């Protein structure tokens, strides 16, 4: 039996199969990672470049792209390095840093998505008060609150998780350091402190979920009252990308963390971890750029201008 004081490194979950399959996994992860870097980087550059996009909606979208870039960069590069070198190691400190940033970025993204639902609610249900309720200072404060809340939750969970005695070895059954997998390594009942912290987090998560649902109930009611079909289509076009991103984020992360232990398996855990930590950062830019004509046009103009130079 090992304990936490004697653990200098952890062993991450290796991709099964032959060396050829490991290299295939490397290529797939690399392709997704590069797609996420390109898509989110393009959104950040486009919004920063065009002053017409300096509005609350695009300000929050820029923050979302930054969080997505950070989230996928926290987990995928280490997995790529391990696959390429055919190893499983991650240092104890590296694992703690990874846990902190994964939880910080995912929690901040959830709070930011809640804020973005409020932005859409004000824009559609109270358009005459939009500039008053969502001025530049208010938007900065709301975004800062989302990031700061993520830092607070990450600090609490990371400090609590790595203060637990680990008596079940050092093999983490995931391709990155994930809190539920580390808790499986702890001693019999010492993980109860982290469970209580997870309960508190779940309560705040539920409150944010209710706020998102309430916002969209009001949004859909307001949109259905718009007399013109063109007006309804324009309103839906600004909401559907955000709703799609929220649905993807919540469905994958909720199932990954709240699924019954009876249906848990290494393969299912791996798939769910990929779905909530790797897929959203790669597809979010695609979701927003496909439905947003203004963003798409500005992005095309930026790319065309770069090639003409």
Image (cartoon, grey):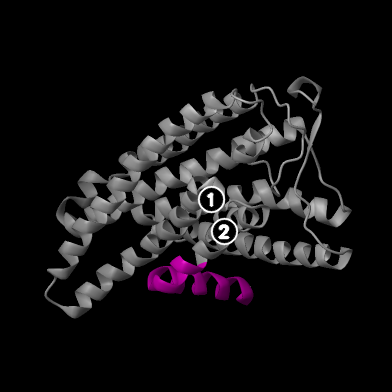
Percent x, y of residue 136: 33, 44
At label 2, counting other C-alpha atoms closer than 10 Å, the crowd grade (few under 14, some 14-19, many 20 or more) is: some
Q: Residue at x 58, y 56 (%)?
A: 272
Q: Secondary structure at mark 1?
A: helix
Looking at the image, which is closer to me, 135 or 76? 76
Residue appearing at x 54%, y 43% in the figure:
105
Of the image marks 1 and 2, the number of the one nearer the N terminus: 1
Asked whether residue 121 is drawn in magenta, I would say no
Q: Would residue 99 appear left or right of 64 to someone viewing this image?
A: right
Instruction: Specify the quadrant that holds the C terminus.
Output: bottom right
Q: Which mark is residue 49?
A: none
Magenta residues (range): 286-308
- Cβ–Cβ under 8 Å for marks 1 and 2: yes
Vertical placement of residue 305 versus 110, above or below = below
Task: Please check the rendered image and state whether residue 287 is part of the magenta-colored stretch, yes or no.
Answer: yes
Classify residue 9 by image quadrant: top right
Side of 64 where 115 appears, left or right: left
Q: Quadrant of the N terminus?
A: top right
Name the residue located 40 percent from the left edge and 43 percent from the top edge: 111
37 or 253: which is nearer to us? 253
The residue that mark 1 highlights is: 256
Q: Is residue 102 visible?
A: yes
Residue bearing mark 2: 275
Front of the two marks 1 and 2: 1
């Amino acid at each position: 039996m090992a304990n936490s004081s004697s653990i200098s490194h952890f062993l991450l979950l290796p991709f099964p199969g032959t060396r050829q399959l490991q290299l295939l996994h490397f290529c797939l992860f690399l392709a997704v990672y590069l797609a996420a870097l390109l898509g989110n980087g393009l959104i950040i550059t486009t919004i920063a470049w065009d002053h017409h996009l300096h509005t609350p909606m695009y300000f929050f979208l820029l923050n979302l792209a930054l969080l997505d870039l950070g989230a996928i960069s926290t987990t995928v590069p280490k997995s790529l390095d391990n696959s390429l070198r055919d190893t499983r190691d991650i240092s104890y400190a590296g694992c703690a840093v990874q846990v902190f940033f994964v939880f910080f970025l995912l929690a901040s993204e959830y709070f930011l998505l809640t804020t973005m639902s409020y932005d859409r609610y004000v824009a559609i249900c109270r358009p005459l008060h939009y500039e008053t309720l969502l001025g530049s200072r208010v938007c900065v404060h709301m975004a800062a609150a989302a990031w700061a809340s993520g830092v607070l939750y990450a600090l609490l969970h990371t400090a609590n998780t790595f203060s637990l005695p680990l008596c079940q070895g050092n093999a983490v059954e995931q391709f990155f350091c994930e809190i539920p997998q580390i808790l499986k390594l702890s001693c019999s009942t010492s993980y109860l402190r982290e469970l209580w912290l997870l309960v508190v987090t779940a309560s705040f998560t539920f409150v944010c979920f209710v706020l998102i649902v309430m916002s969209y109930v009001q949004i859909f009611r307001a949109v259905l009252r718009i007399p013109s079909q063109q007006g309804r289509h324009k309103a839906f076009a600004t909401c559907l990308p955000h709703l799609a991103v929220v649905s993807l984020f919540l469905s994958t992360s909720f199932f990954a963390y709240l699924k019954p232990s009876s249906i848990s398996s290494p393969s299912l855990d791996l798939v769910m971890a990929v779905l909530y930590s790797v897929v959203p950062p790669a597809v979010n830019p695609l979701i927003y750029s496909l439905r947003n004509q203004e963003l798409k046009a500005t992005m095309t103009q930026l790319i065309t201008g770069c090639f003409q130079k």
